[in-house]
Amino acid sequence: MCAMFSPATRRKAKLRIVICSPAGYGKSWNVLQFGQTLARLNNTKIAAIDTEHGALSKYQGVTFNGMPPVEFDVCELSHFAPSAYTACIREAAANGYGVLIIDGLSHAWTGIGGALAQVDQKKAAAGGNSFVAWKDVTPQHNELIEAILGYPGHVLCTMRTKMEYVMEEENRNGRKVMVPKKVGMAPVQREGMDYEFDIVCDLDEAHTLIVGKTRCPAIDGQRVVKPGPEFLAPVIRWLDEGVDGPAPSPTFIPPTAHSGAATGGAIDGGEKATDLQVSEITIALQILQLPGQPAAMLAKRGVDALEKLTRQQADEALTNLRQKMAAKKLDLERQLGEAERAKPVTDQNPTAAAPSQTSTPTGGGSSNSAQSSTPPATPSAGTPPCGIENHPVPEDPDRIGSIHEDDQKRIVAYCQKLRIGDDDLKRILAKRIAKANPPHPVQCLPNLSWNQAGEMIENLKAALLKRFPDACPF
């Protein structure tokens, strides 16, 4: 037997299906009912990635064809970088979800922060050089595909298709007339993306499911009006054919010009670290407040830049950094717990306590807020407490800097009352990641999003009530 080849083996598989159609044709409905069928069959849970501002959650509790109401856990994305999808997919895999629904995959291509948006941004920065722009984005998109194909459970995706109208001839009352008809065209994604899946289906305006491409012969060419779970019966039998177990290893890796193979040497270069790995290392170094140039870490691995690490080296570095971040988080929680338990003498009577003379955290907020005295438990008449107004939710509550100025003041006042200093506040902020490109730890209060500010205020309010049960939070 040749060392490079081994006998082919039919192995049991997990479903990889994508349903394509224009908006409103029933993509979400069908992936949910198919996902519930697979979840009940395998006694597992469903994780869903929702890119439609919570639209998928409106189906929570819906009953499909006599089955119990559908239940699933959801992650609602508002920034659609392919790396954001990849991070969600890996998180779902790590938490043991046997069924993953991605509704929808088109946003990773055309949405805010998606591949095309990143290319436009990088192209402008590179003076119109498309090659440089795609050089950074293509690996990120390829990694998303690999995350989908390598997921340990079933994956069901949706993709939008472009909408066009065609004129078709109809017979009405004995007369032939031309009427416009909506038709879906190619999926909104990178060309050829649909062929990464085992089964590709289209939905038409009459909710007819049309199998356009399949590796399962039993459903080849099927057209089913409003399909139910029974559509999956032959697919499930096909998936269960074969033996259990992973694919054979090792996988052959072709030599490269720089790997030493040209001179007869061993392959030692390894595959280059991905953009996502480099980004995660950079974020981890910022959170740990390490120098911007991790010279010692790079020198140990024989390189002078993060981009020159191999994937294996990057994985080793990330494992080490994650352990350090976990240890730092535990230490910070311990310090905060000790601070909460330690009640100064003046705090025994909060209403009579003198204003604090210690330094107060500004977090980038108003200097007047930082220098003000500790607010009394009950606000004085005629002086409205900061943040008491109910401000409208901004259009993008996850956008960097969407925090309201009054909420900045409220956080500063809570930190004063709880004796949280500047350094502790910075560490608390750094635990929150700004949804930017690339993502990075929050550095100061004005960089918080509206949602992050609300979460932080609730946490501080709970800590205040725990420490001062008679206090009146504002």
Image: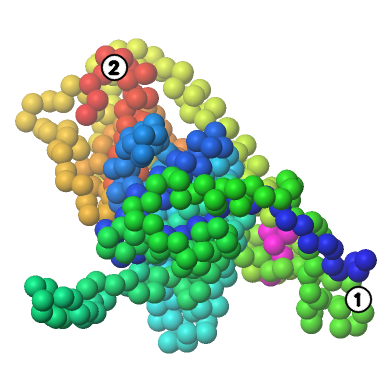
Residue receiving disc 2: 350
In the image, 309 versus 205, the foreground residue is 205
Q: Where is residue 137 in the image (x, y as percent from the top left)?
A: 51, 72
User: In the image, is 317 to the left or to the right of 211?
Assistant: right
Q: Main secondary structure of the magenta part?
A: helix
The colour mode here is rainbow
Of the pair 317 and 413, the residue shown nearer to us? 317
Which amino acid is tagged 1?
Gly
The secondary structure type at the circle numbered 1 is loop
Query: What is the span of residues highlighted in magenta in the rendered image?
Result: 308-314
Hey, which quadrant is residue 277 in on the image?
A: bottom right
| Residue 473 within the magenta-colored segment of the rendering | no
Query: Eyeballing the image, is 194 above or below 86?
Result: below
Quarter holding the C terminus is: top left
Q: In which quarter of the image is residue 4?
A: bottom right
Q: Give the residue displayed 54% in from the left and 27% down from the top.
A: 334
Image location (x, y in percent) of residue 211: 45, 63
- Going by the numbered disc 2, the residue's amino acid type is Pro
In the rendering, at what x and y percent does residue 180 appear?
A: 18, 76
Could you say which is closer to the camera, residue 165 or residue 262? 165
Look at the image and say whether residue 313 sits in the magenta stretch: yes
* Residue at x-position 24% and y-position 25%: 473
Q: Which mark is residue 162?
A: none
* Percent x, y of residue 125: 43, 80
